[in-house]
Amino acid sequence: MSSLQSRILVAVIGVPIIIWVVLWAPSIVMAAALALLAGIAGMELQKCVSGAKNDMVGLSAIFPVFAVMWYWERPDHIAMLCIIEIVFFFGYAIFKGGEVKFAQVMAAVFAGVCIAYSFAGFVRIESTGVHRGVLLLPFILSFACDTFAYIAGLTMGKHKLAPKVSPKKTVEGSIGGLLGNVACGELFVFVMEQFFGGSPIGYGAMALLALICGIVAQVGDLSFSLIKREFGIKDYGHLFLAHGGVLDRFDSVLFVTPVIEIVLKLVMQ
């Protein structure tokens, strides 16, 4: 199977699943799906840092799953879980007497705290009472930027954006991604206004939000590319075939989701 064929296959299967889970699945199903993605992401990150399977890989998968479900069930006590997690991983490193390195501890803590926090953002957004169609916004304002940046870079790209981190990305592609994000954000508002009873964010605010999310999405993409380059890997995993692993596919989403959550809280006050 060629790279293009595998990408098409993942899109044909993956997009309907995402839409169903986000729009119509029971909340517990959505929370479980997010927890699963967070757990796989934690495992991918630890394997990248550790370079091999070990106890830390399994532990780095368990804690993000637990954290996302904790956000869903008892969000008011999440700080306690973060403290427990940090103490646990450093305690485990001490117990192993130097076998577990600081980078491995930080990867585990980052997965259990930051990655879990971002995936759980969908749960927190739903809890505000907005139409569940709004939960598609983090995907739209991440994937649209990535798609339009790819097209613009392929057709017009000349000036390298960050050659030491991601050699194929260009300034022209980056600008195309931002403009595409704004267009898709405006389309989202139109669809929500016409068919789903209104959008919590108007056209003007959406244009600004889409622009900000486009910048944040590209920072997220480059950030996880930076980690891959540091540890000498091409992809975090192969769950999505040519798309790579969870962190390859959802790197931008992890950065964009908290931004949208914060903006929604501000506009709904």
Image (cartoon, rainbow, N blue to C red):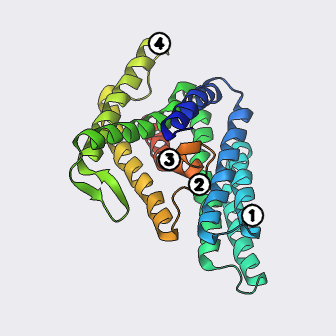
Please tell me which of labels 1 and 4 falls first in the chain: 1
Mark 2 near mark 1, Cβ–Cβ under 8 Å?
no
Tag 3: residue type? Pro
Distance CA(mark 3)–CA(mark 2): 11 Å
Tag 1: residue type? Leu
Distance CA(mark 1)–CA(mark 4): 44 Å
Tag 2: residue type? Ile
In the picture of the structure, the residue carrying the numbered disc 3 is: 258
> Residue 186 at x, y = what percent?
34, 26
Drawn side of residue 204 relative to residue 111, left or right? left
Query: In the orientation shown, which residue stands out farthest toward the front?
Result: 1
Which-is-in-front pick, marks 2 and 4?
A: 2
> Residue 146 at x, y = what percent?
40, 41
Q: Which of the 4 image quadrants contains residue 16?
A: top right
Please tell me which of labels 2 and 1 falls first in the chain: 1
Please tell me which of labels 2 and 4 falls first in the chain: 2
Q: Is residue 183 above or below residue 70?
A: above
Q: Is residue 195 above or below residue 18?
A: above
In the picture of the structure, the residue carrying the numbered disc 1 is: 59
In the picture of the structure, the residue carrying the numbered disc 2 is: 115
- Of the numbered discs in the image, which one, if any, rests on residue 74? none
Please tell me which of labels 1 and 3 falls first in the chain: 1
Q: Is residue 267 above or below residue 83?
A: above
Query: In the orientation shown, which residue stands out farthest toward the top?
Result: 195
- SS category of the residue bearing label 3: helix
Res 269 seen here: no
Which-is-in-front pick, marks 1 and 3?
A: 1
Distance CA(mark 1)–CA(mark 3): 25 Å
Drawn side of residue 49 relative to residue 232, left or right? right
Distance CA(mark 2)–CA(mark 4): 33 Å
Mark 1 near mark 3, Cβ–Cβ under 8 Å?
no
Residue name at image x 45 percent, y 59 percent: 225
